[in-house]
Amino acid sequence: MYICVDFDGTLVDHRYPEIGEPVPGAMGWLKKLQRYGAKIILFTMRGDDPERRNVLQEAVVYLQKNGVELYGINRNPDQDSWTNSPKAYGEVYVDDSAFGCPLIDVKGFSRPCVDWKKVGPHLEHMCLSRR
Ligand SMILES: [Mg+2]
């Protein structure tokens, strides 16, 4: 299953261009979902600017260091054969800005972030039911 995940406010506290503290449960759930065969695609507004700062690459490295193996970065490498759409194909999108996404307030965080206690089990169910 292809899961597109946003970065700021979804996996880490929103401190752009810095990288905030990890959102509770986010890394653990991503690694668990990967063990179920989920293909994680980072789907973020972060972009690299060689003349200033490579904030996208910083996010990618951060995730790698946390054991998250990305299947794609702002694109799904498997969709080229059937579409030339610029939107990365995912079966589900997790984004703190998405309508309906469960959010929590975490003490010390800059704004509400994704509630992985709700999102994680739902994605787990989706992964397991598609195997
Ligand atoms: Mg966000």
Image: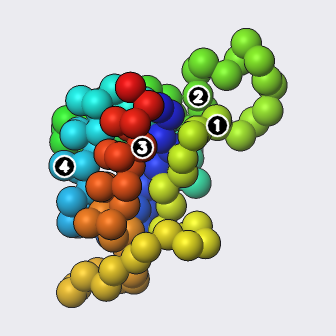
Q: Which residue is label 3 attached to?
A: 126
Marks 3 and 4, Cα distance to the nearest angstrom?
17 Å
Q: Is mark 3 on a helix, strand or loop?
A: helix
Do the CB atoms of the residues marked 2 and 1 lie less than 8 Å apart?
Answer: yes
Marks 2 and 4, Cα distance to the nearest angstrom?
22 Å
User: In the displayed structure, does residue 99 sit left or right of residue 54?
Assistant: right
Q: Is mark 1 on a helix, strand or loop?
A: loop
Q: Which image quadrant for residue 111?
A: bottom left
Residue 28 — which label? Answer: 4
Looking at marks 2 and 1 on the same chain, the residue that comes earlier in the sequence is marked by 2
Q: Which residue is label 2 attached to?
A: 76
Residue 5, position as x, y percentages in the image: 46, 49
Residue 22, position as x, y percentages in the image: 23, 61
Q: Which image quadrant for residue 75?
A: top right
Q: Quadrant of the C terminus?
A: top left
In this orientation, which residue lies closer to the viewer: 20 or 113? 113
Looking at marks 4 and 1 on the same chain, the residue that comes earlier in the sequence is marked by 4
Residue at the spot x=73%, y=12% of the render?
Answer: 81
Q: Please rate how many residues cluster around mark 1, counting C-alpha atoms within 10 Å: few if below 14, some from 14 to 19, many from 20.
A: many
Q: Is mark 4 on a helix, strand or loop?
A: helix
Relative to residue 16, is residue 32 depicted above or below?
A: above
Residue at the spot x=71%, y=40% of the render?
Answer: 87
Depth-wise, is mark 3 or mark 2 nearer the camera?
A: 3
Residue type marked 1: Ala
User: In the displayed structure, does residue 60 sit left or right of residue 74?
Assistant: left
Residue at the spot x=38%, y=68% of the render?
Answer: 114
Marks 2 and 1, Cα distance to the nearest angstrom?
5 Å
In this orientation, which residue lies closer to the viewer: 10 or 48? 10
Looking at the image, can residue 43 be seen? Answer: no
Q: Which residue is label 1 attached to?
A: 88
Q: Please rate how many residues cluster around mark 3, counting C-alpha atoms within 10 Å: few if below 14, some from 14 to 19, many from 20.
A: some
Q: Please rate how many residues cluster around mark 2, counting C-alpha atoms within 10 Å: few if below 14, some from 14 to 19, many from 20.
A: many
